[in-house]
Amino acid sequence: MMKNNNLLFSALLFFCSSTLFSCNQTEFYADPYANGLGIFSNTDNNLMSCYIQNQAWRTRDRSSGGFGGTNFELFINKQITSGVSDNLIFTWYGNSSANNALNGDISLVLSVPKFFGYREMSALKGQRIALDTTNGYFRFSSSQPNIGKGTGNIYFHNIQIDSIGPNNFTGRMSGLLDAKFGSSVILSNGRFDHNITSAQIQF
Amino acid sequence: MNKVIALLLGILFFSNCDAQFYVEPILGYQIDLNKNSKLKQLNTAINICWKARPKYELILQVQRSWPSSYKSSDPSYTTNPALPVYAAANKSISPSALSLLIGHRIKLAGRSSNNSLFVNLSAGVSNQHIKVDYSYDKNNYTILNPDKTVKETGLYLSGGIEYMRNLKTGRIFTQVLFGGFIHDKIDYPNSFYFLVPFSLNVGYSIPIFKK
């Protein structure tokens, strides 16, 4: 009877620990030179942070396990269009430190050729691209009124995508970005650093 | 801090008035033993030394390590299309430290001559301050993996070998020591660690009291 109780207790403990406790895979190191932002890094910190209207904004923590399941801060997908080019979309999900109206997601939409694949994505490494809404744009979705497409700049310090199976990719990327939405909403000092798992890339 | 020093000196002074006391100014240079580190310091210290027995001396040491700034650069980048994408951010790292240590000087050889060899072991509290300064275009560029200033106060151990020569008016000595924090983790991905100093010092031992 006592042995059965111990077994039951162990099973219950294992169930509780595996469902209650999630694993945080985001490293936030505060930038000593930009209040409220994480450092610009290339060490897989799984974070994008920036100022939006001078308020610090950062992506949600990447976590796995627990009741919430796995949460990713970034997804990359390729959107097939009926036009001459397709869209490569990077979407960051996050929150503002001081203004809930800024909680939402920020997307980078790049216009890419139909043949664009993971090898071409790696070719973005070291490139700085000025987005003028014809070659791509930024999009900011929040509870604020629709502010339309944003212009801006992105610098891919590193981006490397590797195929690990049919339609199955992993990689890493880091860089800088800034954007302007409409006449008043400005995203500045953006920096990102991610280790990318196969669940985040949808080609 | 002043009260602690006064108390320790008082204990030393009154516990054995037959003992010989020395004041020992020390000057030296130290490098960092951490892998790939180029941090260096000038080392100064003052010892109050109590020669309790012919082969044993108890030392109270106040040590100050002065920074010898190490200059290098880190990469910085910008999204501004009007500027070059890359620029070097000039970096200066200045490590300094202040320590209060209690040490033991144990004679290994040279009991009957003017030349002696000692082993020196110390323990105490140390404060390390590693200051990082950058010089770059802060408005346009962002540094990749920047270092930041760190401070830490913790338990500190040091040890080494000391050669001493008796003179008519005192004693002159040179010592080789190394030390470090017992716990030295920095919770930030800096390019450096708290110093593990390896020092070469010279000092002069001035007798100040004998009953």
Image: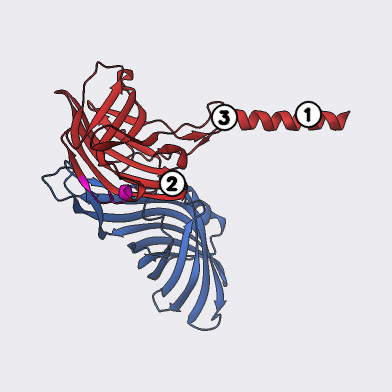
Nearer to us in this view, A138 or A59: A138
- Vertical comparison of A188 with B197: above or below: above
Which residue is disc 3 drawn over?
A66
Q: Are marks 2 and 1 on the same chain?
A: yes
Nearer to us in this view, B18 or A38: A38
On residue A170, the disc is 2
Pointer 3 local density, CA inside 10 Å: few below 14, some 14–19, many at least 20: some
Distance in Å between CA atoms under marks 2 and 1: 40 Å
Q: What number of labels is visible? A: 3
Amino acid at pointer 3: Gly
Q: Colour of chain B?
A: blue
Where is residue A176, by image quadrant?
A: top left
Q: Colour of chain A?
A: red
On residue A8, the disc is 1
Place of residue A67 in the rendered image (x, y in percent of width and height, measured from the top left): 56, 26
First reached walking from the N terminus: tag 3 or tag 2:
3
Pointer 2 local density, CA inside 10 Å: few below 14, some 14–19, many at least 20: some
Q: Classify mark 1: helix, strand or loop.
A: helix
Place of residue B54 in the rendered image (x, y in percent of width and height, measured from the top left): 57, 72
